[in-house]
Image (spheres, helix red, strand yellow):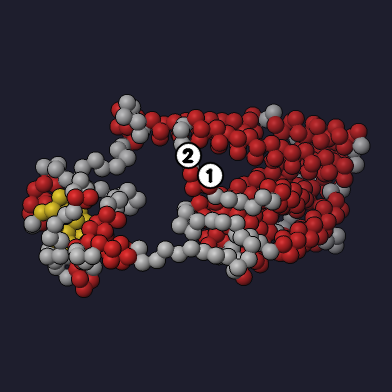
Amino acid sequence: MNKLWLIMKNEFVYTVTRRSFLFTLFVLPLIAFGVGWFSTMGTRQDSAPVQALVGPTSYSKPEGLVDLSGLVTAIPEDFQNQFFLYESTDEAVAAYKEGVISSYYVVQPEYLQTGKVLYYREDFNPLGGLENTGPLTDLLAYNLVPDDPRLVMRVANPMNVNIEYTTEQTERDPNSGATFFVPYIVTFLFYIVIFGSASLMLNSITNEKTNRVIEILATSVKPIDLMTGKIIALGGVGLLQTLIWSGAGLLVLQLTGRSMPDVAAYQLPATFLLWGLVFFILGYLVFSGLMAAVGALVPSLREASQMTTFLIIPLIIPLMFISELATNPSGQLAVILSLFPLTSPVAMMARLAATAVPFWQIGLAVLLLVATVIFVLRGAAGIFRTQNLLTGKPVNLGVFLRALAGRE
């Protein structure tokens, strides 16, 4: 037990004091803070130099409107600060060249049949360039039904749906961006944390084999104690990194004055953190065990790169179907990914962030993960032998799987 404790302590201290780890732990949040501060300064009126670099956040000038369909007869008072109405395209072009307007729309003569509107502007900006299309839609709707403003509002917003769930669900706004954004964040976060923590195991073992430190350790401790100590210590490193990054992210938002009200109002289940810890631990044990087995077999990190590619594919699969997990968390594909042990640590957390998952599915995913952890750690312990640690040999996927199953 004393040797196990020493391995855990030394591995933890050595990892967290490495320059590369300290760089990712502290410098990356500082870079994020700098970017957040810079972008915030760009929106302030008293920061002209910064604002000149980042450019204006929006156009202060109104836009022009040319109606060739004869539909728009007048612009209501609510829209007069946003649009100037011109009788011909030539007038709009002249106003545009003089800088009176920032851009202009031309409603085509066949608008009633096709809905076609041309938009003329200086640059390409797919996100901010169409900022007035909403008011323009309202303006056109107002002129389509000029005598009944209530009918205009009903045409523009035909339904006001209130969702009533037939099963127990956490209240969420279907129109909020956070409803789709939060599962994306959770998926990426769990992928980075699990794979990053497990990768530390592979780097540690291969570096010790390259530096021949493993020869000294092999004469002092049992290989199983060495593997167990590394798994526990590097799991703690991963949790520490997650806590510091999460805290730094919140601090950056506060110091830069930024807020994400939709995300702040987004309600996650009360048990989300508990299940997050469970799936992180189990997922980390599975992939760290696989990384330990690879590190024990291969002679150096270069030979391990090919095997690592095969190991991370299951974690990448939920990222490939992240849109499906966020928009259809109860679909067949989402359920399968959240139950399959090699994808469930990431996929299940994405589902939990998106909807209320039946308890039997969570329980089954945990049981399958526990069984996988037992199989992987037993196989890794069989591979983690002195002979493998001191020698190493070329490894392919077939050799690795046979060794993991105890047939090599």
Which kind of residue does numbered mark 1 sit on? Answer: Ala
Q: Residue at x 81, y 32 (%)?
A: 9
Separation of disc 2 and disc 1 at Cα? 8 Å
- Residue at horizontal 49 percent and vertical 48 percent from the top: 262
- Label 2, residues with CA under 10 Å away: few <14, some 14-19, many ≥20: few
Q: Is residue 298 visible?
A: no
The answer to whether one can see residue 51 in this image is yes
Q: Residue at x 70, y 40 (%)?
A: 239
Q: Is 209 on the left or on the right of 194, as rendered?
A: right
Crowd class of label 1 (few under 14; some 14 to 19; many from 20; radius 10 Å): few
The residue beneath circle 2 is 259
Q: Which mark is residue 264?
A: 1
Is 267 or 68 nearer to us in this picture?
267
Of residue 205 and residue 324, the one placed in the foreground of this image is 324
Locate the C terminus by quadrant: bottom right
The residue under label 2 is which amino acid type? Ser
Name the disc covering residue 142, or none. none
SS category of the residue bearing label 1: helix
Where, by quadrant of the figure, is residue 2 drawn?
A: top right
Q: Could you tell me which residue is drawn at 11 percent across and 51 percent down?
A: 93
The residue lying toward the viewer, choosing from 261 and 23, is 261
Q: Give above or below for 285 relative to 118.
A: above
Q: For the residue labelled by badge 2, is the local secondary structure a helix, a strand or a loop? A: loop
Where in the figure is residue 118, as x and y percent of width and height? Answer: 20, 60
Q: Earlier in the sequence, mark 2 or mark 1?
A: 2
Look at the numbered discs 2 and 1 and tell me whether their residues touch, using CB distance below 8 Å. yes
Answer left or right for 222 relative to 288: right
**Image quadrant containing the N terminus:** top right
View extreme (bottom): residue: 113
Q: Position of residue 170 (x, y in %)?
A: 60, 57
Location of residue 347 with respect to 2 vertically, above or below: below
